[in-house]
């Protein structure tokens, strides 16, 4: 049985150094960002607030943290240096959760049942979930008795309890607007959450979109109809919109930007990181319904001297779609699109059959001709159907690998334009339950908005009289 991930108390993280993979310090941890959930479910840890040497505070997602050990945080080295701005659904762990007075529910004598007691939160612990990169706040370190004043040391019994043993943190069941909706639908796949968003009012859709983190919103945008994508992107602040576009697959970002007015498109591209913007611009140079317009610029590319073990390590990346992880593309250096000389493909099944030390250059499949970037959609679809492919390389006339087309993008462009609006993502009963819940929550929120408007009008009339 695999060992449980170590538990880390957040007070030990305050001020510790953050390093890139090369060992260079990039900053220090100043806080942690979490999102609360309905009921007593443990909060999910979104990332860290890191202060750079320039004193600017930025957000570092937990997906870019590769290790927390020996008083230091190790990152992937990819940082977004835009200034951190807290969003409505986010909570600062050190700044907002510690030193808070909450209620501890304990089991008393059989005759009395559960008893409650007010306690002070001294610390909370975080732990990485097994076989996933998600982190949760799982335990709370509390002190019983009255809180200590500025010149008096608080006394009382201290103990560590499960998050579920404490109330006063979690979202309330009603009146939380977008926060409550997010918590309710957190477990949905992006396609199913997109389906829910599509049926919300424009006001509520904008609220939920604004509260989603960048990666989640990017995944959901990719599954929404075009009109909804444009509407949501247009209501975000431009810097936030650029962050979300960076988090999207380059081909999806290119399709979305292609629907915007030229002025808006250029302004957003200028705000994106240069490398991400360059990938998107390259895709936008091709017609949408061609291999060049369909492809992603981020397939798995390896050099001939890479081993099977190297290839499998890349395939295991949980951020890759199943289609992209189905094969790797072997190129002579440089091993990045669009410059590497394409040699051939190694399929995932072949990687499983050979020893880990085998070089991928000795096992490439070069029998099939790669796709030309100008190949039109029917030709691309015919290629996939003829050879039972889930992904295929796109290579230019000089032999350089430009990217890869995946079967999901081919289907996306062959289905009717309104296919995303058809409610077939969930099974019928689950969908009905979600829609009923959604409508109930919308009706409740609308009534609250109307009551608030009525109170405001009444107060205005009273002031006028």
Image (spheres, rainbow, N blue to C red):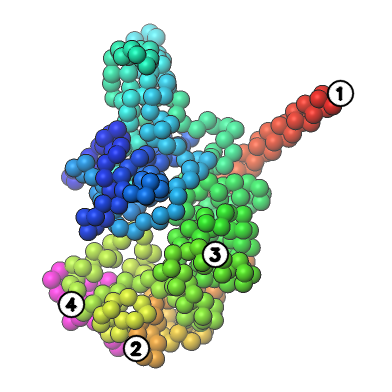
Residue pointed to by mark 1: 465
Question: What element does badge 3 sit on?
Answer: helix
Give the residue number, with chain letter if any, for mark 2: 399
User: Mark 4 to mark 1: distance in Å?
Assistant: 84 Å
CA distance for labels 3 and 1: 50 Å
Alpha carbon separation for disc pair 4 and 2: 19 Å
The reply to whether the C-beta atoms of the residues labelled 2 and 1 are less than 8 Å apart is: no
Q: Position of residue 386 (x, y in %)?
A: 41, 84
Q: Which residue is mark 3?
A: 268
Question: Looking at the picture, how far across and down is residue 319, in whole percent?
Answer: 36, 60
Residue denoted by label 4: 305
Residue drawn where x is 28% and y is 66% of the image: 315
Secondary structure category for the residue under label 4: loop
Image side of residue 85 versus residue 125, left or right: right
Q: Could you say which is closer to the camera, residue 101 or residue 424?
A: 101
Residue plotted at (28% across, 21% down): 159
Q: Helix, strand, or loop for circle 1?
A: loop
* Span shown in magenta: 348-367
Residue depicted at x 59% and y 61%: 229
Picture quadrant where residue 301 is located: bottom left
């Amino acid at each position: 049985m695999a060992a449980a991930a170590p538990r880390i108390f957040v007070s030990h993280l305050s001020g510790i150094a953050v390093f890139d993979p090369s060992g260079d310090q990039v900053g220090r941890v100043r806080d942690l960002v979490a999102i609360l959930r309905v009921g007593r479910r443990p909060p999910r840890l979104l990332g860290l607030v890191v202060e750079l040497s320039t004193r600017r505070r930025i957000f570092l997602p937990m997906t870019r943290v590769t290790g927390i050990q020996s008083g230091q945080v190790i990152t992937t080295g990819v940082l977004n240096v835009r200034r951190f701005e807290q969003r409505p659904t986010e909570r600062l762990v050190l700044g907002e959760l510690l030193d808070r007075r909450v209620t501890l529910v304990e089991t008393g004598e059989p005759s009395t049942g559960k008893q409650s007691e007010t306690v002070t939160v001294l610390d909370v612990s975080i732990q990485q979930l097994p076989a996933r990169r998600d982190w949760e706040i799982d335990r709370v370190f509390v002190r019983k008795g009255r809180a200590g004043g500025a010149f008096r040391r608080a006394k009382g019994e201290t103990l560590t309890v499960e998050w579920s043993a404490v109330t006063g943190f979690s979202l309330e069941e009603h009146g939380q607007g977008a926060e409550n909706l997010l918590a309710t639908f957190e477990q949905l796949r992006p396609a199913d959450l997109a389906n829910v968003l599509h049926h919300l009012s424009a006001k509520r859709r904008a609220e939920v979109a604004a509260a989603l983190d960048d990666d989640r919103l990017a995944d959901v945008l990719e599954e929404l109809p075009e009109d909804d994508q444009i509407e949501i992107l247009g209501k975000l602040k431009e810097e936030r919109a650029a962050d979300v576009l960076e988090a999207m697959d380059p081909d999806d970002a290119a399709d979305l930007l292609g629907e915007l007015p030229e002025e808006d498109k250029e302004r957003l591209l200028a705000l994106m990181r240069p490398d991400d913007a360059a990938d998107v611009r390259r895709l936008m140079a091709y017609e949408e319904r061609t291999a060049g317009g369909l492809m992603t610029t981020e397939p798995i590319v390896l050099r001939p001297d890479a081993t099977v073990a190297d290839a499998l390590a890349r395939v295991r990346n949980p951020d890759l779609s199943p289609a992209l992880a189905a094969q790797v593309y072997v190129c002579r250096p440089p091993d990045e699109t669009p410059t590497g000389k394409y040699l051939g493909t190694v399929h995932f099944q072949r990687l499983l059959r050979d020893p880990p030390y085998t070089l991928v250059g000795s096992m490439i499949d070069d029998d099939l001709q790669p796709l030309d970037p100008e190949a039109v959609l029917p030709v691309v679809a015919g290629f996939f159907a003829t050879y039972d492919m889930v992904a295929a390389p796109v290579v230019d006339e000089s032999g350089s690998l430009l990217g890869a087309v995946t079967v999901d993008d081919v289907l996306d462009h062959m289905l009717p334009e309104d296919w995303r609006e058809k409610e077939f993502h969930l099974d019928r009963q689950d969908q009905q339950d979600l829609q009923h819940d959604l409508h109930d929550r919308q009706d409740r929120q609308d009534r609250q908005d109307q009551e608030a408007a009525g109170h405001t009008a009444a107060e205005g009339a009273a002031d006028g009289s």
